[in-house]
Image: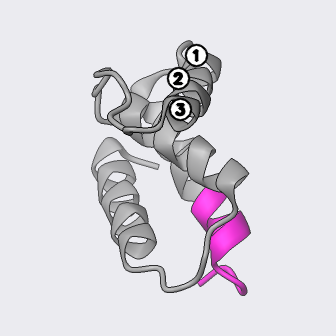
Amino acid sequence: MSKKNLHTDFQEAVAFVSNYEFPIPADILLKLYAYYKVATKNFSNPGSKTPLINAFKANALIQAQNISIEDAMKEYINLVEKELKPDGK
């Protein structure tokens, strides 16, 4: 996959998640959050007003901190394809 296709596929996956109409399980949301933050090089602190949510988000980021930007994009896309798209479309 070329970098251009990877970026396009990533943006399409992000748009898909943004428009997803069903509840997403918390473990999937946390993985998506971490992959997105790494892929977009946004390492700001979690911004929830709930300390427990911030702790879960921070933990997800710690688990994903050693992957590359490209791998984070790929993991995000793969997670969307596997968990949120029922027939892989």
Q: What's the mark number on residue 58? A: 2
**At which x and y percent is residue 45?**
34, 22
Along the horizontal axis of the image, is 69 left or right of 61?
Answer: left
Question: Compared to 83, does 47 lie above or below?
Answer: above
Segment colored magenta: 79-89
Gap in Å between the C-alphas at discs 1 and 3?
9 Å
Kindly identify the residue that appears in the image at 53 percent across and 56 percent down. Answer: 77
Circle nearer the viewer, 2 or 1: 2
Residue 52 in the magenta stretch? The answer is no
Q: Residue at x 62, y 22 (%)?
A: 59
Q: How was this image coloured?
A: one colour
Residue topped by disc 1: 62
Q: Nearer the viewer, residue 65 or 3?
A: 65
Marks 2 and 1 sit apart, C-alpha to C-alpha, by 6 Å
In the rendered structure, which amino acid carries the disc numbered 3?
Answer: Lys
Image position of 3 with respect to 26: above or below:
above
**Residue occupying the point 62% across, 68% down:** 24
Residue type indicated by callout 1: Ile
Q: Are marks 3 and 2 in contact (CB under 8 Å)?
A: yes
Expressed as whole percent of the image width and height from the top left, the position of residue 67 reads 55, 20
Q: x, y (%) of residue 33?
A: 48, 43
> Where is residue 69, by image quadrant?
top left
Q: Dots 1 and 3: beta carbons under 8 Å?
A: no
- In the picture, measured across the screen, residue 42 lies left or right of residue 88, that is left
